[in-house]
Image: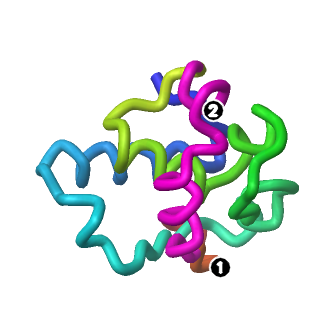
């Protein structure tokens, strides 16, 4: 149900849950995402933009989390039409991936 790499799926689901609680995006100062270290090493996962292509947005955990928090969905139309969205790009800069060696999200 989410247009992102499988590596980013847990982060997207977590962002979906936060967004569903009605957290105001303009109040988010930082987003920290703990994911398995090999996922952070996959090409593009750590990229925070700007996103020139749909593939860059699909691969980026920061884009996936930011778009989910802003739009409340992450269909294939989001990276296609919103990869240059200023709010997405600004929030993506506040997303930090924390590599986990334990294999847990």
Mark 2 and mark 1 residues within 8 Å of each other at the beta carbon: no
Marked residue nearer the N-terminal end (2 or 1): 2
Q: Residue under circle 1?
A: 101
Pick the residue in front: 36 or 92.
92
Disc 1: CA contacts within 10 A as few (<14), some (14-19) or many (>=20): few
Pick the residue in front: 26 or 102.
26
Q: Is residue 92 magenta?
A: yes
Occupied quadrant, residue 5: top right
Q: Residue under circle 2?
A: 79
Q: Which residues are magenta?
A: 77-96
Q: Is residue 91 left or right of residue 60?
A: left
Mark-to-mark CA distance, 2 and 1: 29 Å
Q: Residue drawn 70% across and 71% down? A: 37
Residue 22: x %, y % from top left:
13, 50
Q: Is residue 16 magenta?
A: no
Badge nearest the viewer, 2 or 1: 2
Q: Main secondary structure of the magenta part?
A: helix
Disc 2: CA contacts within 10 A as few (<14), some (14-19) or many (>=20): many
């Amino acid at each position: 149900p989410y247009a992102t790499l499988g590596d980013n799926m847990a982060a997207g689901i977590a962002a979906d849950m936060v967004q569903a609680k009605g957290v105001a995006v303009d109040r988010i100062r930082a987003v920290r995402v703990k994911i398995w270290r090999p996922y952070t090493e996959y090409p593009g996962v750590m990229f925070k933009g700007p996103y020139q292509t749909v593939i860059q947005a699909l691969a980026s955990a920061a884009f996936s989390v930011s778009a989910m928090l802003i739009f409340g969905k992450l269909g294939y139309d989001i990276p296609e039409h919103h990869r240059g969205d200023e709010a997405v790009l600004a929030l993506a800069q506040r997303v930090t991936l924390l590599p986990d060696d334990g294999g847990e999200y």
